Structures are given as structure tokens and as C-alpha cells.
Image: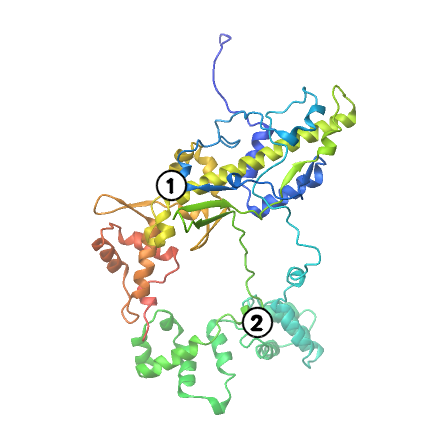
Amino acid sequence: MKLSLQLKLGQQLTMTPQLQQAIRLLQLSTLDLQQEIHEALESNPMLEVDESEAFASEDATHQDINTARQETPPETASDNKGSESGDSDTGDDNRWEDNIPEQLSVDTNWDDIYQGSYSSGMAAPEGDNSDFEARNTVSETLQDHLNWQLNLTHMSDVDRRIAMSVIDGIDANGMLTVSVESIHESLTDELEIDLDEVVAVLHRIQQFDPVGVGYRDLSECLLIQLAQVPPELETEAIRNARILARNHLPQLGNRDYAQIQRQARIKEDQLRDALEVIENLNPRPGSEISPAVADYVVPDVFVRKDTRSGRWQVELNADTAPKLRINPDYAALVKRADSSRDNGYLKDNLQEARWFLKSLQSRNETLLKVASRIVEHQQGFLEHGEEAMKPLVLHDIAEAVEMHESTISRVTTQKYMHTPRGVFELKYFFSSHVSTASGGEASSTAIRALIRKLVAAESTRKPLSDSKITNILKEQGINVARRTVAKYRESMQIPPSNERKRLT
């Protein structure tokens, strides 16, 4: 094998620390960004929250989509083209720069005060503790609620030990997730008990609040709740409801009402009354004590319509993060031609602060520009709703703002837009296309909206099948396969036609 030297020319994108930081900030959600800013403020003495009066201009945070086309998209640190921005420091912002040595290596000159759209702080005003209880109260679990009732119930020590094991096996919905045999087997080493004793204790716990807790299957859950009706209030509908809960739940789940009427020997009006009773029961009684924790979304972008011009306008949320700037007093301590340890520490932190402010500003501009292009493309949705949604893919926005698709993907992930029609993740506005009979394209989101509208208007006694929905859409000029309709229906958690059937 002969060894030789070869010279090759090529281009390669180098992931500098500054670029890595810009990309990381770009893909952070609002809450993660606030945490990142907090950590930067804690670790870098050069950064501080600007608590002076707001100085961000309207042009920095506001953009009319009708003029967005005429603007040249700013190159961001996350774009694979990269750029060097010019010196933008003016006026009072330069009053301390004379003290910074020229040999201080930074990749770009940037505004030392981050004049973004952010408000002057995240903390609540002093003395405002209206939500203190909501933020610091620990929610009660179902086990806590059951153990509290157990402590108020007179039981022997043996029964109490059994009851504790039973409660430990109950999940958040109130269902006993372990078998009675398993509980009995786990206690036989320390207690001499029979299986009937465990069952008896379970029946006592099933009388605890909420009614129906400790059930082993859906039938038992419903029967426990029906058993709470006093004898003097019992009606024919309740008796028939017990029959349905005990013997006909599979047919009830399939809406096979004709078979239920034959097997239970009841008429349609009697079945309707019994179904009304069952529908008022709770199949997951434990959820009353342990409700699901709501996830609150902070929108990154606001969209509103200017009543005067009729144009849709996009602006960044001014309350998502504090305004940051470089501390002028610390920056003034940086000395020329001083290689001491303390001066080196200040230089490094000043450089990091500049990079951080640049990355924040880049994230701000990129998010605003991408959101503006999305709104420009989806004005039909804002005006008329989901049925007017247009097909849109990442490549369309990437081409419009002259950025890479990976950048668009990062900036639309976990970012939310507040519109007059609700709060949506930016990715919600992207959807694939389906061909129409006229040769055009329809958005998959619009097709889902049409399917939902058709199902909402269907006859409950004779619901629309997937094939029937396919034919209706074809009559409207939308060519979509039956399996596609089924996929869209399942994605919206709409049950099949046989399960949507009702007696009324």
C-alpha cells in the first residue's frame, strides 16, 4: 500500500459554543427558558435584571404580517448560514465600552442591553400573596382520604392491618389493582386469617367515600353505587340498571340495544330510563378525590386583528421573561492590558453575557418571524375556523424565512400562540395535504374538522359509518380513503358508529 499526501477543499459547519447555546435556547419552552435565565443570572455577575422603565420599542416586539414580506429575514445563530452582525451599540450603551480592551475576543458586537419584548421581571409584586395557598398546598391523594376514614372507623387490629393492605392496592381511579387472594397471601405470614376476612374488610372499605371505591371491575363499581339507593327511593329504572350492570355490560359497550332488550326482556322506554341511571354513575369514583392536575400553558406569541386596518398582527408575550442587561458597574472594572486573575474572570463573564444576550435576541427575532409567516399563511383559520385551515409543512416556512427546516422545527416545538380562537402550539398549524376533485389541496386538519362536524350533526339512532363519511366528503370534492377517515376519527377519539348509537 502506497502512502501519499492529498490536499482537499471543503466546507464544514463548526458547532462553536455560541452556536450550541443559541440552538439550545431556541428549542427551550417558555418555562425552561425562564429557568435558564435564572441560572444565568445566578452564575454570571455581569448579567442583571433591568428594572428601569420599559425601553423596548414597538418595532422590536411587534410585526404586521402584511409588511413582513418586504423585510429581509435576519440570520440567526441557529441558521446554518450564520453571520457576523455589525456594531449596534449607541449612545449611553457605550459609556463603559471605552474601558474594555480591544483584544477582548468576542465573535460579534451586540447590544449590551437586551432590548427584547420581555417585561421588567417575573416576580409578583411585594405583598401579593393571593396565590400563595394555591402554590404551596399539597393535594390530598385518594389513599390519604381513605386512611383518614380508616382512622375514624372502629376496627380490630387485625382488620385494620388488612384494610391498610387493601387501601395500598387501590389506584387513583379507586380500583383495586391487586387480587384479594394476593392480599391474603401477603398477610398470612404475620396474621392467621381466612380469605373471607379479607373480602369482608374490602366490603367495608367499599362503603367509604367516594362511593364505589375498592371495586374490582366496572360491574362491581356500578353495583356498589346502585346499592346506596334507599329502598323507599328504588324505582323500576334502578332495578333495570342493576340488571344491566350485572349481566349486560359487554352488549352495553357495543350499543347492542336490541340484544339487551331480548335477553333482559325489557322495552325500549325501560331500557332508556335504565341507561339514564347508569350514565349518572361514576365509573372512576377515585377521580373525585384525586383530580388530574391541569397543565397551564404560557403563550409565547399573541395574535390579534387590528380593528382599524383589518390586518392580523403578531407580537411576542411581554411577560415570559425579565429584561436583561450587562451591569455597567462591573463592566467598567474591566481593565486594558491586565492579565490578572480577577480581570480575566471579568472578561470571561462579560463575553459569556454578550453571547447569552445575543442568543436571546436571536431566539426572539426568529420566533416572531416564524409566527408571523404562520399567521400570514393561516389567515383563513383565524377568520373562519379549522375548516379553512390550509396545508402547511416545515419546508414552506423555512423557505419563506430563509432558514433551515431544523431551525423551524426547533422554534415551533413547545411554543404556543394565543389567538382569538384559543391557544395552540405552533406545530398545530402544520398539516399534510389531501388532494381535492378540483385538483387543489385540503389540509388534514380541515378534514378532521369536517369529520367532527358531520359526527356532531348525525342521527344518534343511525350514526354515520366511515364509508358514509367518505362518500359525503367525496361529494364535497375531497378525495379521501375510508381507512384515512377511520385514522382521523380515531385520532380525535371518536368511537366507531356502532358505539355512537343512542336510543334518543
Furthest residue in direction front, as rendered: 308
For the question of whether residue 487 can be seen, the reply is no
The answer to which of 210 and 128 lies nearer the viewer is: 128
Q: Height in image: 7 above or below 243?
A: above
Picture coordinates of residue 250, whole percent (x, y): 38, 71
Tell me residue 151's x, y (percent).
69, 76
As drawn, 119 above or below 458 = above
Q: Is residue 381 above or below residue 500?
A: above
Which SS class for mark 1? loop
Q: Between residues 116 and 7, which one lies in front from this camera angle?
A: 116
Q: What residue type is labelled 2?
A: Val
Depth check: 232 or 322 in front? 322
Q: Position of residue 291 (x, y in %)?
A: 56, 65
Residue pictured at 57% horizontal, 77% vertical: 206
Q: Tell me where residue 177 sits by quadrant.
A: bottom right
> Looking at the rendered structure, which numbered label has been put on residue 180?
2
Image mark for residue 338? none
Image: 96 above or below 480 = above
Q: Where is residue 63 in the image (x, y as percent from the top left)?
A: 46, 41
Q: Which mark is residue 393?
A: 1
Q: In the picture, which quadrant includes the C terminus? A: bottom left
Name the residue located 36 percent from the left edge and 63 percent from the top edge: 495
Residue type, label 1: Val
Q: Which residue is painted at 62% across and 42% down in the image? A: 323
How many tags in the picture? Answer: 2
Q: Dot 1: few (<14), some (14–19), or many (≥20) neighbours within 10 Å? A: some
Q: Which residue is found at the position 71% from the left and 38% from the top?
A: 43
User: Label 2 crowding class (10 Å Cα cut-off): few <14, some 14-19, many 20+?
Assistant: some
Pair 2/1: label in front: 1
Image-based side of 482 in relation to 192, left or right = left
Where disc 2 sits, the SS reads helix
Q: Which of marks 2 and 1 is nearer the N terminus?
A: 2
